[in-house]
Image (tube, rainbow, N blue to C red):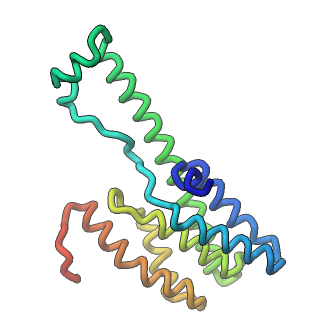
């Protein structure tokens, strides 16, 4: 069941937001179960595609494809499929952006001086946000800044997590910008 959740943007967002909203439960047993759920979810998670399936433009000129789809309006079906794909990509990007914003906000609340979010949920938000670090797109500057601020946190697990994520941010930035050199700067 968690694999299905991990492969769907909407379900992933609902799970993470539900876990973050559970900070009102003070019982240790509940906290342990929530931590177990998160630990079971993480291995199932993989970066969900934002761009969907891609077909080369030369697909419609391939004689084998044209022969296999004889009697159909291939151009029309290809255009309709591309349009549906573009809509699905737009929805996936919106859901991913709202999830990143929610996680960043929770992380920021937990690291603030008022500390309205318990440190466990701050670490959970940071861990979920670190799963959103991708090679195919750069994170926004505000998210990278949250990880930089997390290095100065009083919470040791948060500092360790943020320190581990920083090289990934650098790598994803260099890949997204086209630079593949791994020289430290």
* Quadrant hosting residue 19: bottom right
Give the quadrant of residue 46.
bottom left
Image coordinates for residue 150, horizontal then vertical, percent: 52, 82
Instruction: Tell me the quarter of the image containing the C terminus.
Output: bottom left
Viewer-proximal residue, 62 or 167? Answer: 62
**Residue 57 in the image: above or below residue 29:** above
- Taking the view exactly as shown, the residue that stands out farthest to the top is 71
115 versus 129 height, above or below: below
Q: Position of residue 88 (x, y in %)?
A: 47, 37
Towards the viewer: 126 or 108: 126
From the viewer's perspective, tell me whether residue 57 is left or right of residue 113. left
Going by the image, does 68 lie left or right of 45? left
Q: Give the camera-side residue of 82 and 34.
A: 34
Residue shown at 36%/73% (left/top)? Answer: 168
Q: Looking at the image, which residue is at 35% across and 57% down?
A: 137
Residue 55's spot in the image, x, y percent?
27, 35
**Residue 149 x %, y %:** 50, 81
Residue for point 44% across, 84% down: 163
């Amino acid at each position: 069941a968690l694999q299905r959740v991990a492969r769907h943007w909407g379900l992933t967002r609902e799970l993470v937001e539900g876990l973050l909203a559970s900070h009102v439960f003070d019982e240790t047993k509940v906290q342990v179960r929530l931590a177990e759920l998160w630990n079971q979810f993480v291995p199932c998670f993989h970066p969900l595609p934002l761009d969907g399936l891609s077909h080369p433009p030369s697909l419609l000129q391939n004689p084998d494809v044209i022969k296999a789809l004889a009697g159909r309006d291939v151009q029309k079906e290809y255009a309709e499929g591309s349009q549906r794909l573009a809509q699905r990509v737009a929805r996936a990007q919106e859901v991913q952006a709202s999830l990143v914003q929610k996680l960043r906000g929770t992380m920021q609340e937990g690291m603030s001086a008022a500390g309205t979010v318990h440190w466990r949920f701050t670490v959970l938000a940071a861990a979920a946000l670190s799963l959103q670090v991708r090679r195919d797109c750069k994170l926004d500057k505000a998210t990278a800044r949250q990880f930089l601020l997390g290095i100065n946190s009083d919470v040791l697990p948060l500092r360790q997590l943020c320190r581990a994520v920083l090289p990934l941010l650098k790598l994803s930035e260099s890949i997204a910008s086209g630079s593949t050199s791994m020289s430290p700067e």
